Image (tube, grey):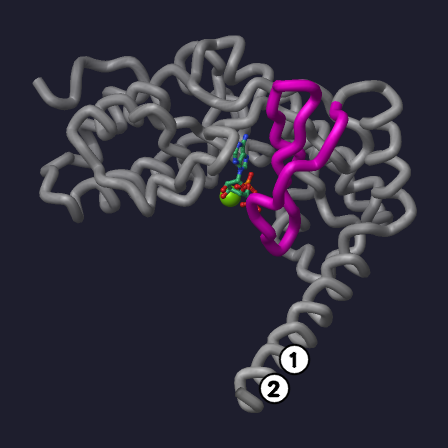
Amino acid sequence: MFSSDEERKEKIEERLKETQKVFGYVFDKFTILNIYKLFTSGTIGKFEFPIASGKESLVFAASKKDKFYAVKIYKTVASTFKNIERYAGQRWGVENTGNKRKFIVQWAHREFRNLNLASDAGVLSPRPIKVVGNILVMQYIGTKRVPAPLMKDCNITKEIVEQTLGEMRTLYIKAGLVHGDLSEYNFLIYRRKPYMIDIAQAIQTDDVMSTVLLQRDIGIMTRFFNKFGYKLDEAKVLKYTTGGSDVFS
Ligand SMILES: Nc1ncnc2c1ncn2[C@@H]1O[C@H](COP(=O)(O)OP(=O)(O)O)[C@@H](O)[C@H]1O
Ligand SMILES: [Mg+2]
């Protein structure tokens, strides 16, 4: 009895520490003000539950009446900001002037724009709803009880493989973009379909870097799928993704 009380107390203290950390890193004044704007503009009415907490962002499910949204909050005071920082420069249209907040705001807007390009082109990805400062509101992928799982935690059927390659192809041909950070961690599986997420760093296909990034994406996805016994050939996948004939034929 006693030890379980102790254990519970320790757990609570641990969680409290974690909460304080999250509050310090995420809910600075600027972020709180932007959340406030989301409420006053009527974009969202309520936070439902947290979905994920990463190095650079936190994602929540929120709702307005009966409709659910995903709210991605980029941390403006995160200490582990290096991952995003490497994307500074003309290509990504984000300037690193040393002003972290400004940079992050540009980054959130960049993700909004890329999501727009992707979903307009018919790629399965969350439709962007609104971006306010460092906060991006988008279509929520999942049910009211649980968010859609990541591809890494799902059963990889041939249909999933085909559809995923199809989404990559549509992104390339129709949206004119290369994702640049694809993996089984950046696809959600919902109603047995793959949804591409986390697309801020995507670049245009006419960029000099696009081939390298496309090869990288294709290498990672091909190796992942082949772990399940598929025998995809990277060169063929590359050809297919950029407009060539079917990879399975
Ligand atoms: N639109 C969405 N609907 C449901 N869950 C989402 C959505 N967008 C992101 N997530 C969840 O939040 C996590 C982090 O989002 P992501 O955009 O990949 O940011 P990060 O840069 O932290 O990887 C994802 O792994 C996924 O579980
Ligand atoms: Mg991600």
Q: Is mark 2 within 8 Å of ligand 1?
A: no
Disc number placed over residue 6 in the picture, else none: 2
Residue 220, located in which quarter of the rendered image?
Answer: top left
Tell me the SS state at disc 2: helix
Is 1 placed left or right of 228 in the picture?
Answer: right
Is 96 placed left or right of 223 in the picture?
Answer: right
| 139 up-or-down from 185: above or below | above
| 66 up-or-down from 87: above or below | above
Instruction: Point out the quarter of the image occupied by ligand 1.
Output: top right
Q: Position of residue 137 (x, y in %)?
A: 68, 27
Q: Mark 1 sits on what residue? A: 9
**Chain part drawn in magenta:** 44-71
In the rendered structure, does residue 176 fall within the stretch colored magenta?
no
Q: Nearer the viewer, residue 229 or 238?
A: 229
Is 124 placed left or right of 63 in the picture?
Answer: left
Answer few, some or many: residues within 10 Å of disc 2's Cα (few below 14, many 20 plus, some between 14 and 19). few
Spatial distance from mark 2 to mark 1, Cα to Cα?
5 Å
| 49 up-or-down from 245: above or below | below
